[in-house]
Amino acid sequence: MSASYEIRMKVAFHDMDPLQVVWHGNYLKYFDVARFGLFAHHGIDLYAYMVEKRYAFPVTRTALKHIAPLRAFDEFVCRARVTEAQYKIGMAFEIRKAESGLLCARGTSEQLAVRYPEMEMEFAIPDDIRQALGF
């Protein structure tokens, strides 16, 4: 079964734009919090992996669909789910208001494995990462 993770968060005042809704770029920040929570929950420390095994996993693609706005101090749940971990790490994200379950945003991301510091692309996710993510 592929890895997933949910985290409950609250919109901070400084995440707002002049229209009093969450600025669109902050949704990617929320996705990143869920992504690193997912990795940590499944025993993966990407920084330690880079230092010890000389692999980095940069995000190479993102997509985001805004559906309903988050506003000041809204509580929400961001869910990250691994969709692929063979040749790249693919993730799907959802942000829903905590109380109502209203879907606010959906997104996806892709990460590649690269040799560090050369930044040479590998064409497979290392077996220990792949297995920890349920693939």
Image: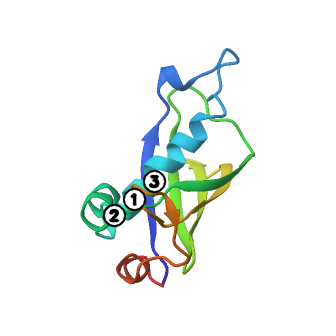
In this image, 61 relative to 74: left or right? right
Vertical arrangement, residue 69 with respect to residue 55, above or below? above
| Residue type pointed to by label 1 | Tyr
The crowd level at tag 3 (other Cα within 10 Å; few <14, some 14-19, many 20+) is: many
Asked whether the beta carbons under mark 2 and mark 1 sit within 8 Å of each other, the answer is yes
2 vs 3, front mark: 2
1 vs 3, front mark: 1
Instruction: Determine the secondary structure under disc 1.
Output: loop
Residue 98 visible in the current orientation: no
Give the residue pinned by disc 2.
54
Vertical arrangement, residue 22 with respect to residue 104, above or below? above
Residue projecting furthest to the front: 118
Residue drawn at x 46%, y 56% as measured from the top left: 35
Residue drawn at x 48%, y 57% as measured from the top left: 119
Vertical arrangement, residue 89 with respect to residue 18, above or below? below
The front one of 101 and 111 is 111
In this image, 43 relative to 84: left or right? left
Give the residue pinned by disc 3.
34
